[in-house]
Amino acid sequence: MSRLIKNSNGLTLLELLISIIVGSIVITTLLSILSLSVQARSDLEVRDRMKTESYLLVEELRSNLFNLPVHNAEVTSQESDPETIIEFTREYKYVPDGSGGVIADYDQSATYELVYDEVNETITYREQGTTGSLMHSGNVFFTTGTTLELTDFEGTTCTPTTPCSEGVLTLTLVITFSINGTRVDTQTFVTTIIVQ
């Protein structure tokens, strides 16, 4: 009788090749999943940053308008201008009159401007006659499609000839920002602020 000798001390070349192929497929799949996960996280962080920037801008503007308070508001720029300018005017401020009451002090009037500069893609808030300050980070830009609209409650645009004592400020913000000199895809945010 002939006996077959069985060798169980090692792997055959075929077994080794199959295990390398299976291992490569598993590692490739895991690396692909990891890459997709990192990209999804990066995209989420970008969207979150843009949402935060727009939220901070709107909240700062709301705070400024609340603290002013506004007696008149109007769009002072023309449609052909590279800047959209909305003026908010406080005609007087209530001050103590010395006898326990308050009076309107017309010497404390003030005019502030909300300015969207299409050329530099920035939004500033400033006291009339000053340069003001950006309402956003320096690497944030508001691109084509960004609009600032001021209407009264009937929907009529507030202009120098028809200023509003109250109205609705609608901000359409098409926002992007720069990472290492490269701009990311834009996101659009729309919000309204009641001006009273």
Image: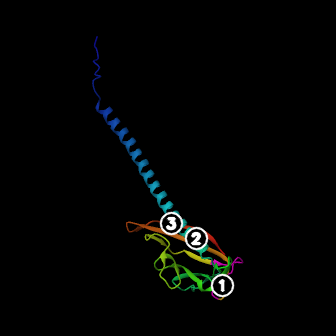
Which residue shows up at 50% across the image and 67% down it?
Answer: 186
Residue, disc 1: 163
Q: Is residue 157 one of those drawn in magenta?
A: yes
184 or 194: which is nearer to us? 194
For the N terminus, the image quarter is top left
**Residues under labels 1 and 3: Cα distance?**
30 Å
Tags 1 and 2 in contact by the CB under 8 Å rule? no
Looking at the rendered structure, the secondary structure element under dot 2 is helix
Looking at the rendered structure, the secondary structure element under dot 3 is helix
Residue, disc 3: 53
Q: Which residues are magenta?
A: 150-160
Looking at the rendered structure, the secondary structure element under dot 1 is loop
| As drawn, 191 above or below 44 | below
Q: x, y percentage for residue 16?
A: 31, 34
111 or 108: which is nearer to us? 108
Which residue shows up at 56% across the image and 69% down it?
Answer: 58
Of the residues tagged 1 and 2, which is closer to the observer? Answer: 2
Closer to the chain start, of discs 1 and 2, is 2
Q: Amino acid at mark 2?
A: Ser
Residue, disc 2: 63
Q: Quadrant of residue 14?
A: top left
**Residues under labels 3 and 2: Cα distance?**
15 Å
Closer to the chain start, of discs 3 and 2, is 3
Q: Is residue 123 one of those drawn in magenta?
A: no
For the C terminus, the image quarter is bottom right
Q: x, y percentage for residue 187?
A: 52, 66
Closer to the chain start, of discs 1 and 3, is 3
